[in-house]
Image (tube, helix red, strand yellow):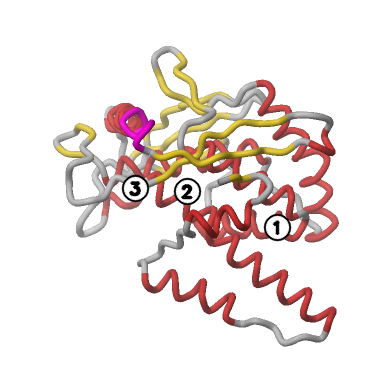
């Protein structure tokens, strides 16, 4: 598995870009697994209530006053083969009914608003996946974007997203920062579900290491890219009266059916789409 070494080049807002370069996971793979294990064991020890009265564990307080938290137990604890440590992630009740459908809808709308912002936000998600913007705070690993990154996110929100959602879709959406916190919690919970044994983190079981956090966020990134390509093809073909390339969407469907709900682009495809924000 390869991951990104990511840094930001900041100028004035019109020139801000996220650039990312690949490096082999052998370099940081051990540290990455150790961080995932720390979070898994922390979550296993969160207090557990009942389905009628869940216990709330606040893991972060965002600068705007909102809270990122888990409710425990989650719905998958009642399955025939239960995920015993499943939790319900949320940010100040903004994501009560969110699933992958709502996540992809949010990102696809952004792709229609502005492709550059769409690509930059996908790179922010990649940073989040591999803890690039996480810090240890009071011995707990937390998503904590720097002041520079927060300013970057705020500029995307103020100058692109808010007006774009209103102009294109006549709606307001959750804030970008809240969205990033939610994805972090969602991916954290996926790790907890798959990599534990006897109430301890365990990456030696039947699931590959990429199962959980990595596959979840890569799918969140990859599926909207494929759908965005199809939408752009429709728009361009309609203008030029060319034939619409339906294979762009059937390819997406095929990826999902072959991989049981996963849709992960190759390194080459990611680099090709995310240029100039992603570099080989």
N-terminal-most mark, 1 or 2:
1
Q: Mark 1 sits on what residue? A: 111
Q: Residue at x 36, y 67 (%)?
A: 259
- Image disc number at residue 214: none
- Image disc number at residue 210: 3
Point out residue 40 in the picture as x, y percentages from the top left corner: 31, 33
Query: In this view of the protein, can residue 113 be seen by the observer?
Result: yes
Which of the two residues, 58 or 31, is positioned nearer the viewer here? 31
Point out residue 127 in the picture as x, y percentages from the top left corner: 54, 37
Q: Residues within 10 Å of mark 3 (few under 14, many from 20)?
A: some
Point out residue 30 in the picture as x, y percentages from the top left corner: 31, 31
Q: Are marks 3 and 2 in contact (CB under 8 Å)?
A: no
Q: Mark 2 sits on what residue? A: 217
In the shown orientation, is residue 244 left or right of residue 212? Answer: right
Which segment is the magenta one? Answer: 26-32
| CA separation in Å, label 3 and label 1 | 26 Å
């Amino acid at each position: 598995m390869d991951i990104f070494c990511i840094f930001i080049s900041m100028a004035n807002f019109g020139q801000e870009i996220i650039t990312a370069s690949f490096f082999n996971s052998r370099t940081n793979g051990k540290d990455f697994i150790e961080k995932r294990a720390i979070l898994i064991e922390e979550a296993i020890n969160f207090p557990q209530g009942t389905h009628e009265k869940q216990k709330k564990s606040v893991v972060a307080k965002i600068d705007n006053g909102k809270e990122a938290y888990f409710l425990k137990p989650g719905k998958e604890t009642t399955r025939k083969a239960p995920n015993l440590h499943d939790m319900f992630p949320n940010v100040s009740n903004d994501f009560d009914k969110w699933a992958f459908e709502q996540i992809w809808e949010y990102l696809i709308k952004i792709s229609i608003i502005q492709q550059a912002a769409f690509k930059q936000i996908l790179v922010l998600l990649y940073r989040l996946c591999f803890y690039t913007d996480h810090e240890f705070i009071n011995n707990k690993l937390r998503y904590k974007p720097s002041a520079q990154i927060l300013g970057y996110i705020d500029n995307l929100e103020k100058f692109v997203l808010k007006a774009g959602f209103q102009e294109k879709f006549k709606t307001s959406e959750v804030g970008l920062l809240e969205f990033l916190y939610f994805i972090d919690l969602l991916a954290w919970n996926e790790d907890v579900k798959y990599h534990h044994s006897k109430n301890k983190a365990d990456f030696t079981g039947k699931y590959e290491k990429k199962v959980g956090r990595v596959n979840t966020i890569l799918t969140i990134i990859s599926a909207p890219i494929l759908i965005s390509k199809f939408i752009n093809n429709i728009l361009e073909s309609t203008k030029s009266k060319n034939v619409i390339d339906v294979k762009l969407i059937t390819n997406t469907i095929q990826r999902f059916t072959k991989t049981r709900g996963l849709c992960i682009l190759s390194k080459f495809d990611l680099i090709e789409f995310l240029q100039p924000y992603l570099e080989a």
